[in-house]
Amino acid sequence: MSPRKAAALRGGDRTLREHLIATAERMIAERGTAGLTVRAIAQEAGVAGGVLYNHFADKEELIALALRAHATAIENGLEPLPAPGTGTVEGNLRAYVAHGLALHGRMVPALTGLIATPEVLARFAGLSDPDRDWRHRLRGYLEAERGLGRIAADARVDAVTSMIVGACHEPVLSTLFQGRGIAEPSPAHSADDLVATALRGIEPREPAE
C-alpha cells in the first residue's frame, strides 16, 4: 500500500499524517492507551505498519499528538469558561473547578496506560497551547479579576492557582496510583470547600479604620 495515499483517504481532504492522528485519537477515546500498538493503529487506519514512521519520528510522537487531540476534543465538549468581570467571582471559580474536574476525570482512561511511558506524557505536555491550557487560563482569569478590583490587590494568584489545580489533579492521581475507581465520585462538598477556601484568600478586604 502506498505511503502517499491510504485507501481510507481516497476522495478525502485529510493528509495521511492527519488521518493517522485522528485514528489513534479515536482508538484512545474508545479503548484508552493500554496496549495501543503501532500495528493496531496501522490496521485501524488501513495502512501498512511501516507507513507510520514516514510521518512520525516514533510511536511516542504519534501517541502524544493523538492524546493532545483527545484532550482538545474533551475541552471542546465542556461548558465555556467565564470571562473576567462577568457574573460573580465565586460562581466563576465554581465553573473553573467544575471544568478542571471534568477535564481531568475524562482524561483518566487515556492516561492509565501511560504510567510506564513518561516520555509520551512529557511530549504531550510540550504540545500544550497556553491559550487553551486550563491552568494558564485560570491564572489569567485571577490576574484579570485582580486588575478589575474584584479580588484583593495583594491576592496570591499563583498560590490560589496551584491549590485549585492540585485539587483537580488529586482524583486522577488517586485513580492512577491508589486504584480508586474512575467512576467513584469525590465528596459532594469538596468543590464547595475548595472554592470557599480560595475565596478566603483573595476576597477584597475592608480598609482598616
Image (spheres, rainbow, N blue to C red):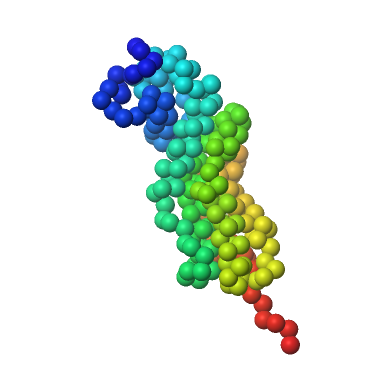
In the rendered image, the vertical position of residue 91 relative to residue 137, given as above or below: below
Q: Residue furthest left?
A: 11
Q: Residue furthest bottom?
A: 209
Residue shown at 28%/28% (left/top)? 12
**Residue 125 lies in what quarter of the image?**
top right
Q: Position of residue 157 (x, y in %)?
A: 65, 61
In the rendered image, the vertical position of residue 35 relative to residue 144, given as above or below: above
Residue shown at 53%/21% (left/top)? 58
Q: Position of residue 191 (x, y in %)?
A: 54, 60
Q: Position of residue 82 (x, y in %)?
A: 47, 62
Q: Position of residue 83 (x, y in %)?
A: 48, 63
The foreground one among 4 and 157 is 4
Quadrant of the image containing the N terminus: top left
**Residue 128 lies in what quarter of the image?**
top right
Quadrant of the image containing the C terminus: bottom right
The foreground one among 143 and 101 is 143
Residue shown at 46%/21% (left/top)? 55
Q: Residue furthest right?
A: 209
* Residue 200 in sight from this viewpoint: no
* Residue 58 in sight from this viewpoint: yes
Residue shown at 62%/64% (left/top)? 198
